[in-house]
Image (cartoon, helix red, strand yellow):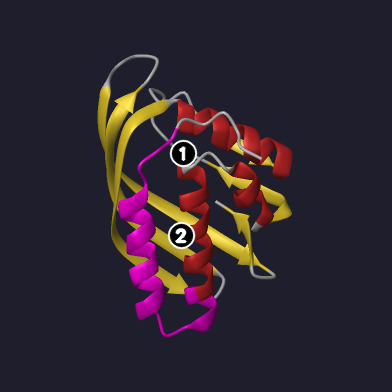
Amino acid sequence: MRDPVEPKNLESVASRLGELADATPDPAASSHLRTLQDALDAIARGDLASVLASAVEDVALDIYAPPEFPFVRTARGADAFRAALRHNFAAVEDQRPEVRDLFADGDRIVLLGRETGVIRHSGLTYDVEFVERFTFRDARLASV
């Protein structure tokens, strides 16, 4: 099932996650990196159902971002998570994320990076550094 998410070009991050998965000696972390890679590919094509298929039912989202970003900042559960993904990815355009570093330890992955783009409602360009922490439970995405 496709959600009304405009196509995104997340290929550079997805391919970087694949490279990191290949280089990670921890089998669990490598598997989780592949899950994130697949999720980004799915988001890029508007297939949020595939993202949710790799997440636990009570998946949690917490975002800490400047107030200029009109994001849904907290979501609990699959339906709220899907709605937040749909809303948040629609809130920005011309996204250019870049992974700069990664820490993987079992069921935890932390990505450090930078992203530029445009906040859709204001037309303001942004250039931010980010930290994204992902946790997994039973080989499925549990929190972002």
Quadrant in the rendering for residue 69: top left
Q: Residue 139: percent from the left, percent from the top?
A: 64, 70
Q: As rendered, which of 121 and 129 lies closer to the eye?
A: 121
Residue named by callout 2: 37
Label 2 secondary element = helix
State the image coordinates of residue 5 (x, y, percent, origin top left).
52, 31
Q: Which residue is mark 1?
A: 64
Highlighted range, magenta: 7-30
79, 72: nearer the viewer:
79
Identify the element where label 1 is drawn: loop
Q: Amino acid at mark 2?
A: Gln
Number of numbered discs on residues: 2
Q: Is residue 12 magenta?
A: yes
Residue 97: x %, y % from top left? 31, 46
Q: Residues within 10 Å of mark 1 (few under 14, many from 20)?
A: few
Residue type at numbered disc 1: Tyr
Measured along the vertical axis of the image, is residue 55 above or below residue 82?
below
Label 1 vs label 2, nearer the camera: 2
Identify the residue at image location x=41%, y=73%.
21
